[in-house]
């Protein structure tokens, strides 16, 4: 595994690989790697000849009062985990090389950020799209893999690449979950043991709504209320939102269908966690880590 910090070297490496006829797979992350990220690496490897993983905590996607400063970072651990996986190139650019000056140009994602995390994290997706566009220009991947864990992000990136004619295919991977259903997240490290146990109510609530959908429930208001009721039974968890949206427009639906995304965000102790389910699929479409799995050290 080669390690690159300099953006110009990153592009040079990618161009050499492409000139040698190799397809480039790309997994952008903010580091503090876990099994969810490593699953994306495996998918990238299955779709390309070489895999680039970037680890960069992008300040532009954090709002004032959010956790940019305390976001977990451990470059040595990330490097070791990447090395033990199918990563060929580990790209960790220092902040000042990515943003030598405060960027003047911003993306305006419009109606796709009118719901879900959009209104709750003003500027977040503008920052995400900006860094993804920059990383795509530096890595020049053939295929980039994103997790459905961040469903709104994956849908926005897919739209951006289509509308701006980026020559990259976006692959969206299922959510990797802990044995109790909690979606893997770098932010799970913020949770105290009782909070960690309580957080499983989020995936339980989503699965409950999926089962209701399976039994014929279609009214979105009833399905979201079911999630609210389940989460309300867990005092350590405070729901921020739950919405049932169309996967193309990201607008709320009145009547749910099989492709409707039921998405939520919640506060658990100091952590803000997100999760979602495709109503026609349920949690069985996701990857469940076995009970005896050992978390990356
Ligand atoms: P992050 O480092 O949290 O910005 O995530 C980097 C990429 O990994 C994004 O495409 C995320 O959607 C994806 N990801 C994070 N957690 C998971 C998970 N539990 N399952 C699948 N993908 C994930």
Image (tube, rainbow, N blue to C red):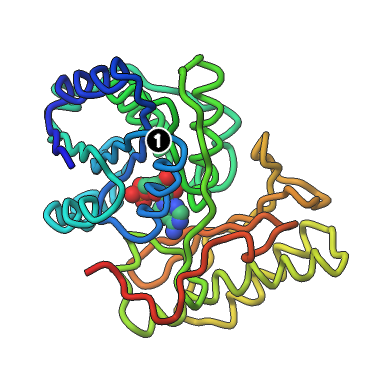
In the picture shown, does residue 211 fall above or below 260?
Answer: below
Expressed as whole percent of the image width and height from the top left, the position of residue 155 reads: 56, 37
Other-residue count near label 1 (Cα within 10 Å), few / some / many at <14 / 14–19 / ≥20: some
Q: Quadrant of residue 80?
A: bottom left
Give the mark count.
1
What residue do we see at 52% from left, 72% from top? 181
Asked whether, in this view, residue 5 is left or right of residue 139, the answer is left
- Which of the two residues, 4 or 122, is positioned nearer the viewer here? 4
The quarter of the picture where the C terminus appears is: bottom left
Residue linked to disc 1: 123
Percent position of residue 56, x then y: 23, 41
Left or right, residue 192 beside residue 3: right
Would residue 284 be seen by someone viewing this image from the given angle? yes
Ligand 1 under 8 Å from disc 1 Cβ: no
Residue 253 in the image: above or below residue 35 = above
Residue that protrudes farthest toward the right in the picture? 216
- Image quarter hosting the N terminus: top left
In the displayed structure, would residue 69 be above or below residue 216?
above
Q: Residue at x 54, y 53 (%)?
A: 174
Is 12 situated left or right of 41 in this image? left
Q: Quadrant of residue 3?
A: top left
Q: Residue at x 37, y 21 (%)?
A: 106
Badge 1 element:
loop
Residue 66, how many percent across, how many down? 30, 51
| Residue 121 seen from this side | no
Residue 102: x and y in percent read 20, 24
């Amino acid at each position: 595994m080669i390690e690159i910090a300099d953006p110009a070297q990153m592009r040079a490496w990618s161009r050499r690989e492409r000139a040698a006829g190799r397809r480039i797979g790309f997994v952008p992350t903010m580091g503090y790697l876990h099994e969810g990220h490593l699953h994306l690496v495996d998918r990238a490897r299955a779709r390309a000849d070489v895999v680039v993983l970037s680890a960069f905590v992008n300040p532009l996607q954090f709002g004032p009062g959010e956790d940019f400063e305390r976001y977990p970072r451990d470059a040595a651990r990330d490097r070791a985990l990447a090395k033990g996986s199918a990563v060929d190139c580990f790209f960790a650019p220092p902040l000042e090389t990515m943003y030598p000056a405060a960027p003047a140009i911003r993306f305006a994602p419009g109606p796709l950020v009118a719901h879900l995390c959009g209104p709750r994290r003003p500027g977040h997706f503008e920052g995400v799209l900006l860094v993804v566009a920059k990383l795509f220009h530096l890595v020049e991947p053939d295929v980039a893999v994103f997790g459905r864990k961040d469903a709104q992000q994956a849908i926005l990136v897919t739209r951006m690449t289509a509308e701006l004619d980026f020559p990259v295919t976006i692959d969206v991977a299922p959510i990797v979950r802990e044995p109790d259903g909690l979606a893997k997240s770098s932010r799970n490290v913020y949770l105290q043991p009782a909070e960690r146990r309580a957080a499983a109510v989020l995936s339980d609530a989503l699965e409950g709504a999926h089962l209701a959908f399976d039994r014929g429930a279609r009214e979105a208001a009833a399905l979201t209320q079911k999630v609210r009721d389940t989460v309300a039974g867990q005092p350590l968890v405070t729901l921020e939102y739950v919405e049932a949206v169309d996967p193309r427009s990201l607008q709320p639906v009145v009547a749910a269908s099989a492709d409707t995304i039921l998405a939520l965000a919640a506060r658990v102790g100091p952590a803000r966690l997100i999760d979602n389910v495709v109503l026609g699929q349920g949690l069985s479409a996701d990857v469940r880590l076995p009970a005896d799995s050992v978390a990356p050290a």
